[in-house]
Image (spheres, rainbow, N blue to C red):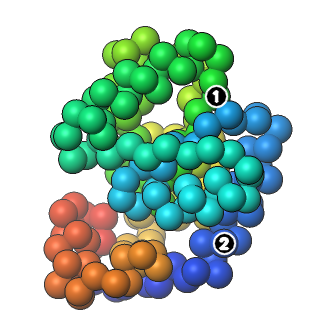
Amino acid sequence: MIVFTPFTHEEMVAGVHAIAAAAADWRPTLLVGVGRGGLTPAVFLSHRMGLSMVSIDHSTRIAQFGEELVAVLARRTRDGDRLLFVEDINDSGKTIGEIRAALAAEGADMGAVRFAVLIDNIRSAQRVEYTHRQIDRAVTKDWFVFPWEAMAPKAALEEDAMEVPERIG
């Protein structure tokens, strides 16, 4: 049985404030919201930090929103920009790993790339520089429902949760 646990709007706002404070000393120059889950926190973080934001959706496999944008972002790192990618959760690490690999393949200065998430699974294949909350998937099997996901029908949430059943059961 899937345990759905709301990640409230208030917790998201607290997470955005925590990430902004933690990332301030690094001074990112551009935020990159990772679609879909990272877009809302990235917009909030953009307002909180006073930074411009772009979005990327590597998972759609639509070149203009993924591969082509990765090439542009890689070039920006070589030109001196510091990119802070924003996601809702680093669970398995698949998305973050794919983005890092794509940026590296395009010659990005990986020292100018960092990731921030609201929830970080300490057992993920990827590490992130900034997080609001850590979980251990060996212990916490809940499926977190972010405010923007709460709009989805329960069947869609169940389908998303079951994409990697070992995460939740």
- Report the quarter where the N terminus lies: bottom left
Residue 153, placed above or below residue 65: below
Residue 28 placement: quadrant: top right
- Relative to 144, residue 151 above or below: below
Identify which residue is drawn at 55% across, 55% down: 42
Left or right of 74: which side holds 59? left
Residue at numbered disc 1? 82
Which quadrant would the C terminus be assigned to in this image?
Answer: bottom left
| 118 up-or-down from 54: above or below | below
**Res 38 visible:** yes
- Asked whether residue 125 appears in the rendered view, the answer is no
In the image, what residue occupies the spot 46% across and 58% down?
A: 39
Tell me: residue 105, above or below residue 19.
Answer: above
Indicate which disc, 1 or 2, sits on the residue closer to the N terminus.
Answer: 2
Q: Residue at x 30, y 71 (%)?
A: 168
**Residue 100 falls in image quadrant:** top left
At which x and y percent is residue 77? 56, 20
- Residue 61 pos. (x, y %): 19, 40
Q: Nearer the viewer, residue 31 or 165?
A: 31
Say which element carries label 2: helix
**How far across and how far down the image is residue 57, in percent?**
32, 46
* Spatial separation of the CA atoms under disc 1 and disc 2: 23 Å
The residue under label 2 is which amino acid type? Val
Q: Residue at x 64, y 28 (%)?
A: 82
Q: Which mark is residue 61?
A: none
Q: Is residue 20 left or right of residue 77?
A: right
Q: Which residue is mark 2?
A: 13
Which is nearer the eye, 91 or 166?
Answer: 91
Relative horizontal placement of residue 75, taking residue 52 as reference (left or right) = left
Residue type (three-letter) at the residue carrying disc 1: Arg
Image coords of residue 156 (percent x, y): 20, 78
Label 2 packing within 10 angstroms: few (<14), some (14-19), many (20+):
some
